[in-house]
Amino acid sequence: MYKIFIVEDEFLVREGIRNKINWENTQFMLSGEASDGEMALAMIQEIKPDILVTDIRMPFMDGLELSRIVKRTLPWIHIIILSGHDEFEYARNAISIGVDEYILKPINSSILLATLEKVAQSIEEEKKKRIDAELLRMQLESTNNLIIEHFLEELVIGAIGTSDAIERAQGLGIDLLAKRYVVVEGRFDFDNTENKSVVRIKANIGNLLKGRSDIIWFFRSYDCLVLIIKGESGEAVIETAYQVSQIIRYEIERYNLGRLTIGIGSVAERIGAIPDSYSDAIKVHRLLGSIRRGHIVGIRDIESGEISASTIMPDEAPVSEKLRYATKADIPRLVSQWAGSMSKTNFQSALMGYYLLMDILVSASRMINELGGDYHNILPEVDDPAKLFEVACNKENFSAFAEDVIKRAIDFRDSCGNLKYGRIIQKAREFINSNYHDSGISLHTVAAVVNLSPNHFSTIFSQETGETFIEYLTRVRIENAKKLLTEGKMKTTDIAYAVGYNEAHYFSYIFKKNTGLTPREFKSRL
């Protein structure tokens, strides 16, 4: 099944495409539509269609500009251009961008369907040719690749100096110079470890990153992908890291080639600091463990609540930091570590134990408070200092009591989800719930509200909520439309505008797609 996305500013044309083709009897699925390129861009990034059908002349952003951006950011998408202008210049520009087909208006549904079939066939042939060509190329270049991979591995682990790295890179035809770098490490989980799957993964990634002068990539092992991303600024390389990570992970999942977990390191300001960035990318994986397998996480994101940093945290780290990242599996080791610091004499031991327990309770209470909880209900021991001193007089009692307190704090933390992302997702949802009626709300709008790049926000929103931004926005709009329909005081056209849709026909289409009923049918069944 191929996903189709339509971009056309003329409503009648969109309606014709939508209604005059019996989509259910084809290998195509109409996954979305928009009235201009700017509105479409955010939706396309979320939906990731296989084929884009777009008009050339539209307000805000025309079809050619939209096609350029899509080909740059989502290179697997095939494009069909619609135009009422039979002019050579348009056709030449479309061809130079990499557009597959060019159809003149007025559009005949049979011609459009035939064109879609043609593009679908091209997609299948392209897949086969691409993989075959990549396999052949990789076999012919295997010796040179081994030399390059060995050099790049030495570079990221810090086994060579800067001057040596620059000289060897030039000899291998690698442009290593840039103002900023960030290293990304992707780790694969395979249902099977056949060489065929690994080779196909390499072939697909090679095709995705072909021509990208800002990315150097190699495999450290059959299940470990490393990317060195270059750019002009720290924000630029981080943005590229999230964007490319999404593209690669989507491609791997699309062809059922395994599951990919991606760690993004810190920004390096010089070649000599590349190993530090790589070390941070590895640290992300150590923090993730098996909890967030299949996700994309940067070193900047390690303050998320489910990530356990205690395994790499120094012993002298504050209790509050250890509690913030600890998992239940860490509790016995942490308590044993604290109990071991208690003095051997009874009085000194009790005093040390009392202060340790107070530190644990205060740190846990602060964390619960930050998450919006009432620590008095969860940790009533905070208000009973006498009991704390009594418990602290015995190491066994100290350990059992401390383990119980920490477990309750972690249970509450985990029930609230991610410390960092929880607040971001909550803020994004609150903004959407308050502004869903604005037809101009988009992925870029909400990303700006939570101070994240669109790619970063799109990644964490789908990972943390299990649905894309577009799916959530649509669900909120449909639920509010149901309420208005239930009240029975407004016309369908007015309800469409009230929930953020500029066109009643498109609102009815989306409503039926999500509920199985038209607004009129829904209202009549109440």
Image (cartoon, grey):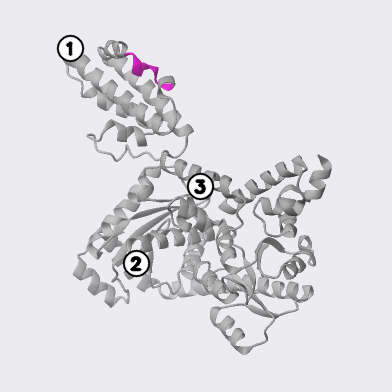
| Percent coordinates x, y for residue 287 in the rendering | 37, 43
Q: For numbered disc 3, what is the local secondary structure? A: helix
Task: Quickly name the residue at label 3.
Answer: 428
Residue sitting at x 49%, y 44%: 427
Near mark 3 (Cα within 10 A), the count class, few <14, some 14-19 or many ≥20, is: many
Q: Does the magenta run of residues contain 382?
A: yes
Three-letter amino acid code of the residue under disc 1: Phe
Crowd band around label 1 with a 10 angstrom C-alpha radius: few (<14), some (14–19), many (20+): few
Measure how far apart labels 1 and 2 are at the Cα level. Answer: 59 Å
What residue type is disc 2 on?
A: Lys
Please indicate, yes or no, whether residue 517 appears anywhere in the rendered image: no
Q: In this view, does 488 lie to the left or right of 339?
A: right
Q: Please tell me whether residue 400 is drawn above or below residue 488 in the rendered image.
A: above
Magenta stretch: dominant secondary structure: helix
Q: Residue at x 71, y 72 (%)?
A: 117
Magenta span: 378-384
User: In this rendering, would 418 be left or right of 280?
Assistant: right
Question: Which amino acid is tagged 3?
Answer: Ala
| Location of mark 1 (residue) | 347
Distance, label 1 to label 3, CA atoms, is 52 Å
Task: Name the residue beneath numbered marker 2.
Answer: 230
